[in-house]
Amino acid sequence: RVAADTVVTIEYRANLTNGDLVDSTERCGPVTYLHGNEQIFPALEEAVDGLLPGEERTLSLSAKESYGEHRADLVRRLPRAQLPPDLVVEIGKRYTIRPPRGEPMIFRLIGVEGDEVLADFNNPAAGQGLEIWAKVVAVRPATNDEIRRGTLR
């Protein structure tokens, strides 16, 4: 049974509520991890907790529990002059700006109004829930060395 300090192999799929695929093991094959050591997305770990090999579970997360609610305060007007002059702007496209002193900021262009652009700095998945399906493929006790290190061999 999946519990803390067990080595778990799972298959999973995570979709936004609009159906867009976020992540899946479909192409890479099952994933193996040490359960209870924060090595995978917490909601995915929670979904398989207590399951036996062959069992599966579906978990639905609200927008708040997944990528967060869409925040109107993260939609901002920027002077077009803050973007490179030769940049061809396209509504719906994502861009990165690098302030002189600070981390790069990613936004989606949602409009152009005169000398300003309307930029949405929300995560693209903000405001959407997440549907997670997971199936346990295998479970085994972790070795003392794996538990001590907190990782697999």
Image (cartoon, rainbow, N blue to C red):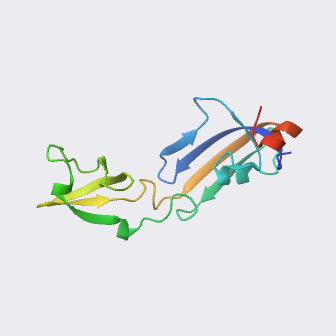
Q: Viewer-proximal residue, 39 or 70?
A: 39
Which quarter of the figure has residue 117?
Answer: bottom left
77 vs 44: above or below: below
Quarter occupied by the N terminus: top right
Task: Count numbered badges in the picture.
Answer: 0
Q: Position of residue 113 (x, y in %)?
A: 15, 62
Q: Position of residue 42 (x, y in %)?
A: 66, 53
Quarter occupied by the C terminus: top right
Q: Viewer-proximal residue, 6 or 56?
A: 6
78 vs 153: above or below: below
Which quarter of the figure has residue 77?
Answer: bottom left
Residue appearing at x 47%, y 52% in the figure = 18
In the rendered structure, the answer to whether residue 59 lies left or right of residue 5 reads: left
Residue appearing at x 60%, y 42% in the figure = 13
Of all residues shown, which one is farthest toward the bottom? 73
Q: Position of residue 76 (x, y in %)?
A: 28, 65
Q: Viewer-proximal residue, 122 or 82?
A: 82
Which quarter of the figure has residue 148?
Answer: top right
Residue 5 appears in the figure: yes
In the rendered structure, the answer to whether residue 119 lies left or right of residue 35 reads: left
Residue appearing at x 24%, y 51% in the figure = 91
Residue 141 appears in the figure: no
In the rendered structure, the answer to whether residue 127 lies left or right of residue 28 reads: left
Q: Viewer-proximal residue, 81 or 101?
A: 101
